[in-house]
Image (cartoon, rainbow, N blue to C red):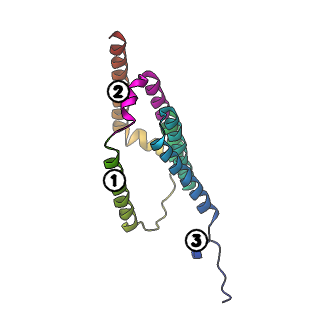
Amino acid sequence: MGSTQESGTEGGVLTESLVVFLIISVVCVAGGLGVVFSRNVIHATFLLLVSLMGVAGIFLLLLAEFLALVQVLIYGGAITIVVLFVIMLTKSDEFESLVDNPQKPLAFLISIGLFVVMTVAAIAADNGNTVRASLKFSDLGHSLFTDWAIPFEVASLVLLVALIGAIVISKQGEEE
């Protein structure tokens, strides 16, 4: 009797950061479920954007500002725009065959199995409460363009080849 609980995570007390994490997690999961169950591919794309922005929010909550910035710019911006362009440039009748797929029950069972395996692995993992030092943007940029210059250039070359290939394929489609 008479014992008091301090604020924090002890004793089941919800902290502000935990409440924010739970809200952002619900947004991420709701967006992901919306993507899966949406019949309209445009709506699914915007729901994907909601989920990706929720992931950026989790990165911000973890004080990983650079990852949040990359998440917003690359995934939230570029990837979502690319998906929208692909949807607009393809014929909508190509998606009709994807609506009722007889493999849905098997895919559902496999996804549940993978979820269980990943959950068990995450619980069994020894995550240790180590605190990592923060990395400045300038240090990251210096490392990226000195130590990792060759892999960075190879990645940019691969993206350039993919872009040129996409242009060639789209030009061939127009000629036919």
Is 82 included in the stretch rendered in magenta? yes
Between the C-alphas of marks 1 and 2, the distance is 34 Å
Residue type beneath disc 3? Thr
Quarter holding residue 16: bottom right
Residue 162, numbered label: 2
Q: Residues within 10 Å of mark 1 (few under 14, many from 20)?
A: few
Residue at x 62%, y 67% (from the top left corner): 14
Is there any visible trace of residue 68 in the rendered image? yes
Name the front one of labels 1 and 3: 1
Is 130 included in the stretch rendered in magenta? no
Q: Is the magenta stretch mostly helix, strand or loop?
A: helix
Q: Mark 3 highlights which residue? A: 9
Taking the image as shown, residue 135 lies to the left or right of residue 112, namely right
Residue at x 52%, y 38% (from the top left corner): 76
Mark 2 vs 3, N-terminal side = 3
Between the C-alphas of marks 1 and 3, the distance is 35 Å
> Could you tell me which secondary element the residue under label 1 belongs to?
helix
Residue 109, numbered label: 1
Image coordinates for residue 166, horizontal then vertical, percent: 36, 22
Residue at x 58%, y 71% (from the top left corner): 9
Image coordinates for residue 119, horizontal then vertical, percent: 39, 61
Q: Looking at the image, which residue sits at the far bottom?
A: 1
- Quarter of the picture containing the N terminus is bottom right
